[in-house]
Image (cartoon, rainbow, N blue to C red):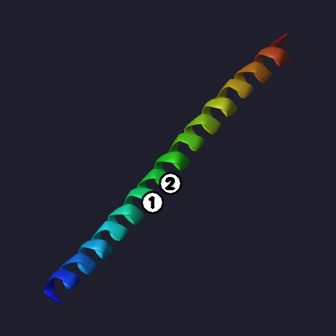
């Protein structure tokens, strides 16, 4: 029975680790998307400024 409990608690730890890893990956993806979006906005703004200047 003790072995079964040990496996059960190990399973919970693995689930928690997977959940935390998934949350971190989601945060990283959001950060990358924000950075790409900011970069796109910046290049669009500079292209727009260039077009207006001409």
Q: Give coordinates of residue 29: x percent, y percent.
A: 52, 46
Q: Give coordinates of residue 27: x percent, y percent.
A: 48, 53
Q: Which residue is mark 1?
A: 23
Total labels: the figure holds: 2
For the view shown, which residue lies furthest in the bottom direction? 1
Q: Give coordinates of residue 40: x percent, y percent.
A: 67, 31
Out of 38 and 50, give the one closest to the viewer: 38
Which quarter of the rendered picture does the C terminus lie within? top right
- From this view, report whether residue 49 is shown above or below residue 24: above
Crowd tier of the residue under label 2, counting other residues whose Cα lies within 10 Å: few below 14, some 14–19, many 20 or above:
few
Q: Which residue is mark 2?
A: 26
Please tell me whether mark 1 sits on a helix, a strand or a loop: helix
Report the disc number at residue 45: none
Please tell me whether mark 2 sits on a helix, a strand or a loop: helix
- From this view, report whether residue 49 is shown above or below residue 12: above
Q: Give coordinates of residue 42: x percent, y percent.
A: 65, 29
Crowd tier of the residue under label 1, counting other residues whose Cα lies within 10 Å: few below 14, some 14–19, many 20 or above:
few
- From this view, report whether residue 32 is shown above or below residue 8: above
- Tell me which corner region of the image, top left, top right, bottom left or bottom right, holds residue 15: bottom left
For image coordinates 55% across by 49% down, the residue present is 30
- From this view, report whether residue 49 is shown above or below residue 54: below
For image coordinates 31% across by 75% down, the residue present is 12
Quote the CA–CA distance across marks 2 and 1. Answer: 5 Å
For image coordinates 50% across by 54% down, the residue present is 26
For the view shown, which residue lies furthest in the left direction? 2
Q: Are marks 2 and 1 in contact (CB under 8 Å)?
A: yes
Q: Is residue 53 left or right of residue 27?
A: right
Which quarter of the rendered picture does the N terminus lie within? bottom left
Out of 29 and 18, give the one closest to the viewer: 18
- Tell me which corner region of the image, top left, top right, bottom left or bottom right, holds residue 10: bottom left
């Amino acid at each position: 029975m003790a072995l079964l409990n040990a496996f059960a608690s190990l399973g919970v730890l693995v689930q928690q680790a997977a959940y935390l890893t998934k949350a971190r990956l989601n945060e990283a993806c959001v950060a990358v998307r924000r950075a790409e979006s900011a970069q796109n906005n910046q290049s669009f703004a500079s292209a727009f400024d260039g077009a207006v200047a001409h």
